Image (cartoon, rainbow, N blue to C red):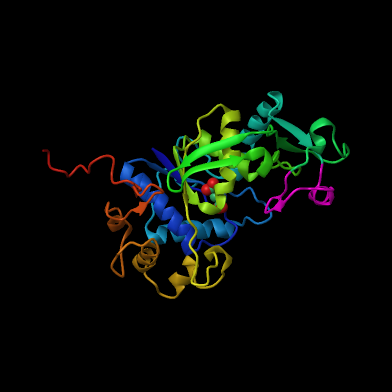
Amino acid sequence: MRGRFAPSPTGRLHLGNLRTCLLAWLQVRRAGGRFVLRMEDIDRGRSRAEYAAGIFEDLRWLGFDWDEGPDVGGPFAPYTQSERLDRYREVLARWQAEAWVYPCTCSRKDLLAAAGAPHAGEEGPVYPGTCREALSHPERPRAWRFHVPRGTEVRFADGLLGGQAQDAAREVGDFIVWRNDGWPSYQMAVVCDDADMEITDVVRGADLLASTARQILLFGALGRPAPRWHHVPLWLDDAGERLAKRSGGYLIADLRTEGVAPEQALAFMARSLGWATPDRISLGELLDPRFVLRDAAGNPWPRAALRPPLSDPPR
Ligand code: GLU
């Protein structure tokens, strides 16, 4: 069993990010698996070295440990995406040769302007397929899109949210795996890494639920089994806003400067999950199997230790 926490160093971590990390860490530690820390810094415009340093600082302050990661190495190093570009290029070349992807020269502006562009979601309109036959602007640098055939219905069982289905062709369409600036997209990098690093369980925020169908298609193109997925409902503040959208108050760095103890921050996170904890609790204490969520079927999640602790008396 191998799990991971894969933050992007595009800002400081807030309680919501860390609560997801807590759940991923508890799942791995209870199962006696290996926990991987991966730095997802391919968004070159927004990633900063000081944010990456801040992530290590925040994680250590709360007491998290990891078995593999940028600082400790491991069998699948490097664990920083910007150092893995050669690997992504290799995968792109393979997908080009196997015709999973095709070049595209449409700009975002072209797509928005295209008559009848269906719905423009967070990631832009569903691609109308312009470059599938011939490049729209052969003089421009090329991006590469993954071809999603009509009627591609992706189904999976989410460990927390239960059965999911997405009509990938209608809801997302052909999507970018390689950007025209020479970098892989998030979807591609995350799948290459989860496959290469042999991640068996992905625990992450439910804001990424809509990406999962695309990622399952990419695992298929790699010829690798997809991991089990567990999407954690987002933490909303009293006003119903996502924590991520709020600046002050919820950053770990701020709590630390205000003199809050790590055990208080952990108790706050745990209580937001509905767990009855004292005012202060350590990570080790949170390993207690009574701290569980309920999955869609009402079963405890993450499950109690798969391997009994060594101190258990023989029966
Ligand atoms: N790097 C992504 C983020 O910070 C998470 C990727 C993932 O968990 O799949 O939002």
Where does the image place residue 204, in percent across and percent down from the top left?
A: 49, 50
Looking at this view, is 220 or 199 the one in front? 220
Please say if 101 is above or below 263: above
Please state which of residues 126 and 246 is positioned toward the viewer in this rendering. 126
Residue depicted at x 65% and y 51%: 43
Please say whether residue 177 is visible from this viewpoint: no
Q: Is residue 33 left or right of residue 192?
A: left
Residue 72 falls in image quadrant: top left
Query: Does residue 280 sit above or below 132 in this rendering?
Result: below
Residue visible at 53% across and 68% down?
240
Residue 265 in the magenta stretch? The answer is no
| Left or right: 250, with 81 as reference point | left
Q: Residue at x 58, y 47 (%)?
A: 210
**Which residue is at the far top?**
98
Identify the residue at the far bottom of this view: 258
In the rendered image, the residue lying farthest to the left is 315
How far across and how far down the image is residue 76, in percent?
Answer: 49, 36
Q: Quadrant of the N terminus?
A: top left
Q: Position of residue 155 (x, y in %)?
A: 53, 37
Q: Looking at the image, which is closer to me, 209 or 25? A: 209
Q: Report the label total.
A: 0
Where does the magenta region start and end? Answer: 106-126
Asked if one can make out residue 271 in the rendered structure from this viewpoint, the answer is yes
Quarter that holds the C terminus: top left
Question: On the rendered structure, is 34 left or right of 210?
Answer: left
Q: Position of residue 78 (x, y in %)?
A: 53, 40
Q: Quadrant of residue 33?
A: top left
Which residue is more in the foreground, 182 or 289?
A: 289
